Image (cartoon, rainbow, N blue to C red):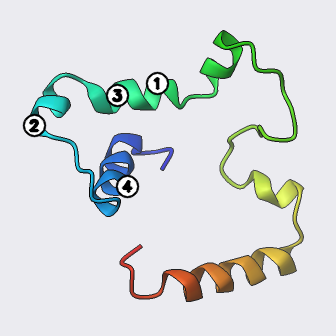
Amino acid sequence: MKEQPQLHLRKLAEFMHCPFSAKEETEGVVDEILGLCSFGWKIVFGIENSAFFRKGEVGDWKNYLTAEIGDRLDKIIEEKFYGSGL
């Protein structure tokens, strides 16, 4: 998601049966949404760091979870999303 956020936002919108229209695409709605979802906006809105926000770094979960728990979560995710195409 971090490498190709526009692509994944489009896929998420399609998955939710709300794809972007051609007009929305040309008007930059995708980039606008991505901008509003960035961590930089929490500063603009005066949101302080809390337990709800993390660094947003890929792999940062390793600083909080053990490898065993990571494996268990992977298995649960595979089971829950099996057949969904995700």
Q: Of callouts 4 and 3, which one flags the residue occurring earlier in the amino acid sequence?
A: 4
Q: Which residue is mark 1?
A: 35
Q: Which residue is mark 3?
A: 31
Q: Nearer the viewer, residue 7 or 49?
A: 49
Above or below, 76 against 7 in this view is: below
Q: Residue at x 41, y 42 (%)?
A: 5
Q: Residue 15 bears which disc, if any?
A: none
Location of residue 71 by image quarter:
bottom right
Question: What distance separates the C-alpha of mark 4 from that of mark 3?
Answer: 14 Å
Residue flagged by tag 4: what amino acid is it? Leu
Is 5 situated left or right of 7 in this image? Answer: right
User: Picture coordinates of residue 6 (x, y %)?
Assistant: 34, 41
Question: What distance separates the C-alpha of mark 2 from that of mark 1?
Answer: 19 Å
Q: Which residue is mark 4?
A: 12
SS at mark 1?
Answer: helix
Residue flagged by tag 3: what amino acid is it? Asp
